[in-house]
Amino acid sequence: MLETTVRASERRHGARNLPQTDEDGLYEIRLESLGGFGAHLAGKMLAEAAVLQMGLNGAHFSSYGSEKKGSPIKSFVRLAAADAAVRTSAPVERPFVVAVFIDHLLNDPAVLSGLRAGGILLVNTAQSPQEIRDRLDFHHDTVACLDATTIALEEKTRVNTAMQGALAAMIPFLDVAAVREVLASTFARKNASIIDGNLRTFDRGAAELRVDRREPAAAGRSVVDVPPQWGYLDAPIGGVVADPGNTVTKNLSGSRAGYIPVFHADKCIHCGLCDLVCPDNCLSWDIVRHADESWDTRLRGVDYRYCKGCRACVDACPSGAMTAERETPGFADAHTVPLDWSPRVVNGGRLHEPG
């Protein structure tokens, strides 16, 4: 866990009052993402703007795995009034705002865990707020959607900048100008040539936000309650977690950043170069038997469950059978060709390669 805590020392935009706080006087935000999408930096800049520019006290820290890029990351922002102390560095479990940087993460119900009644759910998605509500069966509170991936691709920037613009526009006490100022100063220290593109991305994130505000959940439900998968009564013997981890069966779809390889069978020469460079064994092959009892292998398509969108196969393909295209909702599920791990007999030998 990496932690950065700062106290209010500057009030360039005037001190702000928090419209709502928890029992400890804190306003908490949780960013759900994967490593490489900039959630850590986004949280850091939001906290910096709130503390150094707006006169609040606050803390920011992130939690992520050793793999960093591609592994789940949670970025936490905890804010308090200027005269209140932040006395905890525990993970944010009951946030007022949950921002999801990749909509694939919504497949895990725990992403919404702890969201307070009357809170805000912000999702990077091309879908509408109503579609997200139907998908999650979440028909209360505020749901906001932003196609941050498209904005980032068009502006040649990153998803986190667009999401920052959306968060600054959604959270009522945040000063958009203060967050924008911190954004500009941060990128000025890194590379001044990228400031303009990131400011455009930030502004579009605030302007292109689609918001559906509804009444808070019925009385008696203070947070979204997502029970853990296992408890002490039903945990596996020895504490072994049997879910796929870093294995060939790990679902990598959440690691994709907007583009996927698309297979065109009519152009394929079945040379196998794509399979040589694929790091995750997600290409599905078949065995074709001929009348003379000879056989060949033929590429059938891509099992998108295991494709993280690196597009190495696109670069390797000599015939144009693999192209990089923007991923749209539902495309991967509709066009995935599942791997076949069952052994088959060919010329007396048992093949255990995927089909």
Image: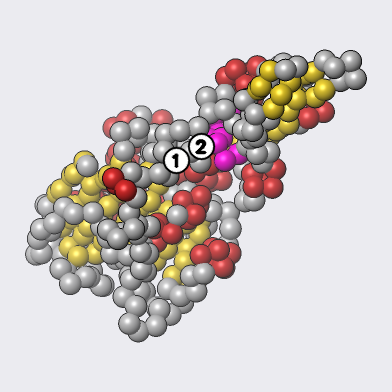
Q: Residue at x 90, y 20 (%)?
A: 291
Q: Identify which amino acid the numbered label 2 is placed on.
A: Thr
All told, the count of numbered labels is: 2
- CB contact under 8 Å: marks 1 and 2: yes
Q: Is residue 53 magenta?
A: no
Q: Identify which amino acid the numbered label 1 is placed on.
A: Pro
Residue 42 visible in rendering: no
Looking at the image, which residue sits at the far right?
291
Q: Residue at x 50, y 59 (%)?
A: 145
Give the residue number, with chain letter if any, for mark 1. 244
Q: Position of residue 268 (x, y in %)?
A: 77, 23
Task: Judge whether 353 appears above or below 56 on screen.
Answer: above
Which picture quadrant has residue 158?
top left
SS category of the residue bearing label 1: loop
Q: Position of residue 324 (x, y in %)?
A: 64, 32
| Magenta range | 304-311
Seen from the viewer's position, the closer of residues 320 and 247 is 247
Quadrant for the C terminus in the image:
top right
Q: Position of residue 304 (x, y in %)?
A: 60, 39
- 10 Å neighbourhood of mark 1: few (<14), some, or many (≥20)? few
- 10 Å neighbourhood of mark 2: few (<14), some, or many (≥20)? some
Q: Residue at x 48, y 70 (%)?
A: 138
User: Which label is found at residue 153?
Assistant: none
Disc on the earlier residue, 1 or 2: 1
Looking at the image, which residue sits at the far front?
348
SS category of the residue bearing label 2: loop
Looking at the image, which residue sits at the far bottom?
219
Q: Viewed as shown, does residue 287 lie left or right of 252? A: right
Give the residue number, with chain letter if any, for mark 2. 249
Quadrant for the N terminus in the image:
top left
Q: Viewed as shown, does residue 245 lie left or right of 326? A: left
Seen from the viewer's position, the closer of residues 198 and 59 is 59
